[in-house]
Amino acid sequence: MIEVKNLYKRFGDLEVLKNINCKVNESEVVCVIGPSGSGKSTLLRCLNMLEEMTSGDVVIDGDHINDKKVNINEIRAEVGMVFQQFNLFPHKTVIENIMLAPQKVRRISREDARKRAVALLDKVGLSDKENNYPSQLSGGQQQRVAIARALAMEPKVMLFDEPTSALDPELVGEVLEVMKQLALEGMTMVVVTHEMGFAKEVGDRVLFMDEGKIEEEGDPEQIFSKPKSERTQEFLRKVL
Amino acid sequence: MFGFNWAGVIDFIPQLMTGLYYTLLISVLGLLIGFILGAVFGMGRVAKNKIIYGISTVYIEVIRGTPVLVQAIWIYFALPLIIGMNIESILAGVIVIAINSGAYIAEIVRGAVQSIEKGQMEAGRSLGLDHGQTMRYIIWPQAFKRMIPPLGNQFIISIKDTSLLSVILVPELIFQGRLIAANHFNAVEIYTTVAAFYLVITLSLSLVLRLLERRLDIQ
C-alpha cells in the first residue's frame, strides 16, 4: 500500500531523514516509535506531502506522489491524517467539520454527507455532539471528531501523528479505543506514537527511529522483549 | 468680541446634507472597492509567486508611503493627462479612497490570514481540499472575524480622509462647510457642525461593526 524508497529530507543544513526505506502492506498497522526529533513526524508528513521530500520516492497505492503528473489532492483524499493538535475547524460545528470535505472533494450531496457523518459520529461515540462547536468538547472528544472527519473521506490509509500526545492522561484511552476498533476493521494505519502499550497490542509491526534513520524494525513482540539494537534497548529502558 | 451664532447654523443644514450625501457616497463606494483591492493584494502578499508578491508589495508601500492629498492630485490632475481623458471629481474621489484604503486593508487581510494557525491549512489540505478551497472554506471565514476591528479603524480613517477631497472639488462636507464659512464668517459654528456630522457617521459604523462582530462570535 505504501512504499518508501531512499527518502531524504533536509531542512536547510539539517538532515532530518536519512535514507528511509520501508513498506506498509494493506490492512497493516505500523507503529513508529522513537525519541523526539528522530524524524518520526517528518516521515509521516512526507507520506502525504505536507512536507516535501528532498529526494527519494514514496509510492502510495501505485502512485508516485512526487511525480509532477500526479494530482496531490487526489492522493491526499485517499490518505486520512490525524494531528497531534486535532486541527478541527473552530468556526464549524462537529457535523460540519465532518461533512465539508466529502462534499467539496468527493462531490457527494449534502444529504449523503450528513448520513455519512451521523454514522461516523455514532462510531466514535459522539452522536450527541453533532451541533456542538469544537471548543465545547474535551480534547479526547475533539480527537475522535478529527478521526471521524478523516474517515468521512473513506481513505485507504490513515496516518496518525502522535494522536494522544496533547491529551490529558485520562482521555487517552477513549482515542486509542477508537483507533483499535479501526485496526480491527482492517484499516491500513501508520501511527507515530509514544503509547508503547498501543504499539505492542495493536501494532503488526514497529519501526524504531533514531536520528533520522530506521534503527530497527520488527514485530512488536520481538522489538519490546528482545530488541537487537543497543540504541533501541536504551530507548525502551527509559520509556517502559 | 463676537458671540457664537449657533442658531444661524440651521439655515445651512440643507447645504450640509448635500455634502453629507457626497461624503457617504464616496466613502461607501471607495471602501467597497478598497475592500476588494485589499482582499486581492492582501492575498498577493501571502502568495508564493514572486511577481504577484512583488506587485502587491510595491502597491502597498507606494500608497502607504505618500499623502492622500498628493494621491488625490495625481488622480484628478495628472492621470487625465496620461490617459487623455478628464475624470469627474466625484469619480476621482472614489478612486482615491479605493486605492488608498485598499493598501491598508491589504495589510489587514495579510495579517489576519497569517494569524490563522498553520494546522488549519494542513488539516484542509490533508483532506484533499486544494489551496483555494481551503482558503475559502477554512481560512477566510476565521480570518474575516479577526479583520473586523482593524477594518473598523481603517474605515473610520478613510471616511475622514474624504475631507481632503475638497481640494479636487468634490462637493463633500468640508467643501460645503468652507463655502458657507467663507461667505458668512461663521467658521467655528459650521466646522463644528461638520465635525458632528462625521461623528454621527463614524459612531454608526462602530455600532454596526460591533453587532457584526458579536454575530460572528460563536463561542
Image: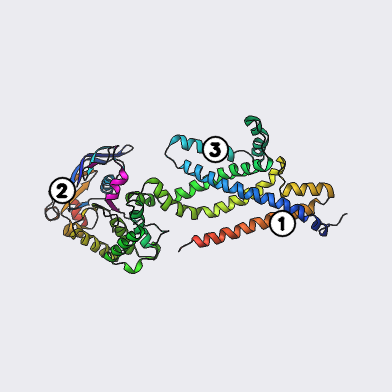
- For disc 2, the marked residue is A217
Residue depicted at x 59% and y 50%: B154
Which of disc 1 and disc 3 is earlier in sequence? 3
Circle nearer the viewer, 2 or 1: 1
Amino acid beneath label 3:
Tyr
Q: Amino acid at mark 2?
A: Glu
Residue drawn where x is 81% and y is 56% of the image? B11
Residue at 18%, 60% in the rendered image: A184
- Label 1: state its secondary structure: helix
Pick whichever, B144 or A16, lies toward us.
B144
Span shown in magenta: A61-81
Are marks 3 and 1 in one subunit?
yes
Residue found at the far right of this picture: B1
Q: Residues within 10 Å of mark 1 (few under 14, many from 20)?
A: few
Locate the C terminus of chain B by quadrant: bottom left
The crowd level at tag 2 (other Cα within 10 Å; few <14, some 14-19, many 20+) is many
The residue under label 3 is B59
Q: Is residue A67 magenta?
A: yes
Which residue type does callout 1 highlight? Ala
Where residue A221 appears, as percent x and y from the top left, is 12, 56
From mark 2 to mark 3, how far is it between C-alphas? 56 Å
Using the numbered discs, state the Cα–Cα distance from disc 3 to disc 1 in whole angstroms. 34 Å
Q: Is residue B64 left or right of residue A25?
A: right
In x, y percent, where is residue B81? 66, 30
SS assignment at label 2: strand
**Circle 1 sits on which residue?**
B196
The dot on residue A168 is none
Question: Which residue is depicted at the point 66% across and 51% down?
Answer: B24
The spot of residue A20 in percent (x, y) is 21, 42
